[in-house]
Each structure stands twice: as C-alpha cells, then as structure tokens.
Image (spheres, rainbow, N blue to C red):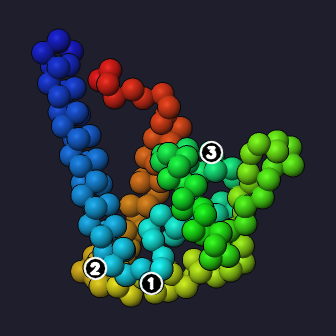
C-alpha cells in the first residue's frame, strides 16, 4: 500500500470512528434526557447509576473504586453516596482492613428502589424507541458490549492529548 493509500485509509477509518462515537454520544444525550424526565421523584441519574452498578455486579466497593468506575471525582461520588445512604439504599461502613477507607454495599431497599425505578422508566423509554425494532437493539448489544469492554480496559492507557 502506498503512503497516500495508507493515509486515505487512515482518514476514512478515523472518519468512521468519529461518526460511530458521535452517534453514540448523541444517543446518550437524548436517552439521558428522556431517562431523567422519567425518573421517580427524589431519584437522580447519578443515584440510579450507582444502584444499577451494584445490581449488575454485586459485591462491595470503595468510594474511590466507584469514582473510577464512573469517571467522576471522589467528591461527586461521596455526595451521591451520602444521599443514597440517607435514603437507606446503600450502607457505608469503615473498611476493617484499612480504617481510613470506607466500604459501600447496596441494601435490599436499594435493590428494590432500582427495580421500582426500572418499572417507572421503562414505559416512557419504550415510547421513545417505539418505532425501533427490538431485535435490532438486541443484535447490536454484543458489539456495543465489546466496544465498552475494550474502552474500559484501555481507559487509563489512551491519552487523547497525544492523538
């Protein structure tokens, strides 16, 4: 392949990648807005995201681990966790292995609130995508999950400032 052909191929691939992630970004903005509007009173997107994280993955996490998972500051996650703890949706305890650290776990009440939130938001979100074929959405999931896993593994390795 000539230098010119390689450059054209790289430009074409870059354009396709940009278009791909641009579409994902726009979809995320539109979905997030619809989702926030459908949330039950008193539940924020950030709070639901934490409950959903625990429902999907189980276990316990430190605030620092949660902040890294959501790519937010420790202060932002601390604020969200305090509100969830006040509502009884998570429990925060001192880490017995490192008394300077905290351990966060989801409560049964938190898991129930997550299910309640899903039930409350699903009809509104279904209206948003009612003209889409659910089988196409399901077919796209494995590919999107591979993209997410790859980006998650590479999150600390990619320096966009160098690109």
Report the mark closest to the observer, 3 or 2.
Answer: 3
Q: Residue at the top extreme?
A: 3
> Position of 29 compared to 72: left or right?
left
What is the x, y in percent for residue 30?
Answer: 26, 66
The image quadrant that residue 50 belongs to is bottom right
Instruction: Report, in whole angstroms, how far the alpha carbon at label 1 lies from the one at label 2.
Output: 20 Å
The tag on residue 88 is none
Element under label 3? Answer: helix
Judge whether residue 150 can be spotted in this image: no
The tag on residue 64 is 3
Above or below 17: residue 81 = below
Residue to which mark 2 is pinned: 128
Between disc 1 and disc 2, whose residue precedes?
Answer: 1
For label 3, count other residues whose C-alpha is less than 10 Å away and answer few (under 14), some (14-19) or many (20+).
some
Q: Give the residue drawn at x 62%, y 45%.
A: 64
Label 3–label 2 contact, CB within 8 A: no
Report the mark closest to the observer, 1 or 2.
Answer: 1
Closest to the observer, 121 or 90: 90
What is the x, y in percent for residue 115?
Answer: 58, 81
What is the x, y in percent for residue 81?
Answer: 60, 62
Screen quadrant of the N terminus: top left
The image quadrant that residue 103 belongs to is bottom right
């Amino acid at each position: 392949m000539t230098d010119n052909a390689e450059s054209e191929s790289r430009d074409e691939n870059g354009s396709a990648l940009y278009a791909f992630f641009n579409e994902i970004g726009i979809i995320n903005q539109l979905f997030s807005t619809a989702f926030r509007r459908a949330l039950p009173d008193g539940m924020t997107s950030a709070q639901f995201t934490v409950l959903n994280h625990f429902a999907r993955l189980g276990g316990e996490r430190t605030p620092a681990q949660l902040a890294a998972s959501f790519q937010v500051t420790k202060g932002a996650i601390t604020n969200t966790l305090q509100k969830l703890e006040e509502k009884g949706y998570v429990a925060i305890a001192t880490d017995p292995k490192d008394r300077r650290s905290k351990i966060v776990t989801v409560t049964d009440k938190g898991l129930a609130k997550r299910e309640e939130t899903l039930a409350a938001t699903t009809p509104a979100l279904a209206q948003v995508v009612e003209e889409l074929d659910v089988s196409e959405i399901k077919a796209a999931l494995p590919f999107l999950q591979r993209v997410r896993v790859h980006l998650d593994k590479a999150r600390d390795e990619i320096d966009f400032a160098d690109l």
